[in-house]
Image (spheres, rainbow, N blue to C red):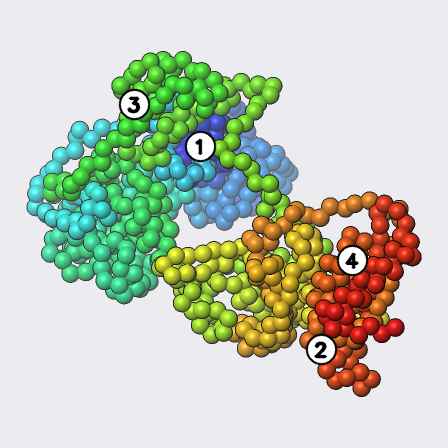
Amino acid sequence: MKISIHRLKDYIPFDHSAEEIAALLTASGLEVEGIDTYESIPGSLEGVVIGEVLTCAAHPNADKLSVTTVDIGSGVVPIVCGAPNVAAGQKVAVATVHTTLYTSSGESFQIKKAKIRGEVSEGMICAEDELGLGDSHDGIMVLDTDLPNGTPANAFFNVARAEVLEIGLTPNRADAASHLGVARDLKALLKKPLDLPPVDNFRVDNENLPISVEVVDAGDCPRYAGLTISGLKVGPSPAWLQDYLKAIGLDPINNVVDATNFILHDLGQPLHAFDAAKIKGSKIRVQRMPQGTPFTTLDEKERKLSGSELMICDTEEGLCIAGIFGGLGSGISDETKDIFLESACFSPDIIRRGSQYHGLKTDASFRFERGTDPNMPVYALKRAAMLIKELAGGEISSQVVDVYPSPVSDHRVPVKYRHITRLIGKEIPKDEIHEILRWLEIEVTNESEDGFVAVVKPYRVDVTREADIIEEILRIYGFDAIPLKEAYQSDFLANHPAKDGNSLQYRMTEILSARGFHEIITNSLTKSAYAEKSPHLEADGSVVILNKLSEDLGVLRQTLLYTGLEVLAHNINRRQKDLKCFEFGTVYCKLGEGYRENKNLSIFLTGNQTAESWLEPAVPVRFSQLYAVVEAVLQKLNVGEPLTEMVEEGAYEYGLKLMLGKKVIGTLGLLATSITRQAEVKQEVFFAELDWSALLKASEGIKKFREISKFPEVRRDLSLVIDQGVSFASLKSLAEKTGGPLLKRIGVFDVYTGDKIEASKKAYALSFFLQDNEKTLTDKVIDKTMGRLMQVFEKEAGAYIRK
């Protein structure tokens, strides 16, 4: 948001520099992000002065040049000039030596002392285009002025120059979205009164153009005011108004629209002017219109109404999307003679919904969405009407119509002195507290020894609680005025969680990145068609967005699968086919009348493990590679060994379901072709989706390194013949239960199926690693442990031990 220092001085006279004002505002919570300088003419004609040509003679060495002497106030200088119209006695604009000029074409150059064809030249007599004042280069500018020689040219040309503050406005400070709002803060910081322009001279000239107003629902529009002005002439705005608007980043349009924009940025009250001749029935209705109604806005786009936005209508049709954007049919044009001027207070919720639905963000909607002052519309309306009469002529041709059925009352907030001291950390004298609040236009009533009641005007939509009042006191008193103690302690309303989910997620991100994975972040909004066409999802379980932007973004995702596949498709289509990606994201589901959201971790593998080279051929990714990554994640989180169950349905051609007890914590496998084709992915994709929320609950924290044992590790191998239905996971579980703390790990290094064993059987070659951290294992202990393992395999797994 841009704020003009010059305009602030109209409200509060001050001598502070722009930098000092910026520091004051930033320290009070209105962060000034930068200070810009607006110049109506680039360079502001600095170094250009009014001069008088004393003599003019032909150049002895050039036919088209003249040698002149010019009085520039500080002395008489020689200047070689090439203009055909230069003559003695003229008042001219002279660029002195070292001056930088900015031409109309956007170029710049510096004036230097030089010799031109043997004659000394100490300056330049300027043409219109050389000063950036126009495009003419037919000759020098001859000025009609009695100003003394040496007078800065910017005084003659009325060059506007303004310092502008760029304020990063936070969402809660809607009251500061104007010059008046910033001036109110300066009023308290500088302890100077604020000069609000009076409207005592507002007069109704006649009542020849009455337009009535009906507000259908006061909840949508608590206050609506308006009046008419007839016989005006639409045209360009004067230079002062155009310069003001350009300084704050707006393009001048015409005197009527410019006046409404001036009031909006000056007072924070959006206004809208309608061509009164286009208001049918001489009546304004503030209402909603049926869903699907077509409406063409000022940008000449036809939009379909949602039915939830508020409209300004006449007796037959819509004229404007209230508080957001005007309609093409009722806008101000060069032919407009009579206008209806609107000044209203709309519900922030209804403006926000309409703005989001239509994708329209305007200066008006920015303010209405955050809440405007319900006491401002009539004052702003009168200010605007008086300004329009000054700029465009005409007569005020109706009384002010003010529909305000339920006036908004001031906020009453009880405040305790002890709470002020406790939250600020310093006891501030009561008189100083009252003075700060008085300068902030917050009234102190019902004062007692313990506290008082603060009465806050409605324009401070962010000040409704005791803590808000205390914050207001502190930001004006000054954060820097609170002394810091050598040691501070903090109190907490709740215990901090033993496990920091953010830290664990960050650590897991590092681990996956180190394995060559790229993190992706996708939109939580997705297509409803994904759930409708997927056998593993319920279409009724999708959370539907009420004000959806499009069908492609119509529901919240139930899984990270499809948004991730869209990322793969985007990259594959650009010939990036070897991909390793992961995402932490929230998924959503509708459960009966309620909703559930959960954080998941997705992992994608597709293409080749390694690129093809002369050393080795390309190797496609395999299920085992995905499983190894998932296993590494679970091990790092220290959640224990999950149970596995085969999956050959739903989203997978084949895969595994992972469980901790009876809780499913994830699935992984090769995605079915029917699934990948929905996202237009035509190559194999291995995918895992883990319940990150459940893993965090089960996690005992990231595994920590321990010192390597100084006692040796022992390996023993077994060859088992087992039924085809017995999994390695079940054998591993039996081994871990039986082997006790001595069994450190177990692996499988060979699997055999073939004609040398029964068709219903398979052979596993397993390796067992034993170690005691306290002493060296003896053969007796090793044999006893291996004996127990063989016994349990034979008894519970039906294994035949090959010896």
Q: CA distance from mark 4 to mark 1?
A: 67 Å
- Mark before the other along the chain sequence, 1 or 3: 1
- Mark before the other along the chain sequence, 4 or 1: 1
- Mark before the other along the chain sequence, 4 or 2: 2
- Mark before the other along the chain sequence, 3 or 4: 3
Q: Is residue 794 left or right of residue 128?
A: right
Residue at 51% from the left image edge and 42% from the top image edge: 102
Q: Name the kind of residue labelled 3 in the image.
A: Val
Q: Secondary structure at mark 1?
A: loop
Q: Position of residue 167 (x, y in %)?
A: 45, 36
Q: Position of residue 750 (x, y in %)?
A: 81, 72
- Mark before the other along the chain sequence, 2 or 3: 3
Q: Name the kind of residue labelled 4 in the image.
A: Gly
Q: Are marks 2 and 3 in contact (CB under 8 Å)?
A: no
Dot 3 corresponds to which residue?
A: 453
Q: Is residue 53 left or right of residue 175?
A: right
- Please say whether residue 67 is visible from this viewpoint: no
Q: Secondary structure at mark 3?
A: strand
Q: Are marks 1 and 3 in contact (CB under 8 Å)?
A: no
Q: Position of residue 310 (x, y in %)?
A: 25, 53
Dot 4 corresponds to which residue?
A: 739
User: Quadrant of residue 518 in the image?
Assistant: bottom right
Q: Tell which of 676 and 71 is nearer to you.
A: 676
Dot 1 corresponds to which residue?
A: 30
Q: Tell which of 656 and 739 is nearer to you.
A: 739
User: Quadrant of residue 401 in the image?
Assistant: top left
Q: CA distance from mark 1 to mark 3?
A: 26 Å
Dot 2 corresponds to which residue?
A: 724
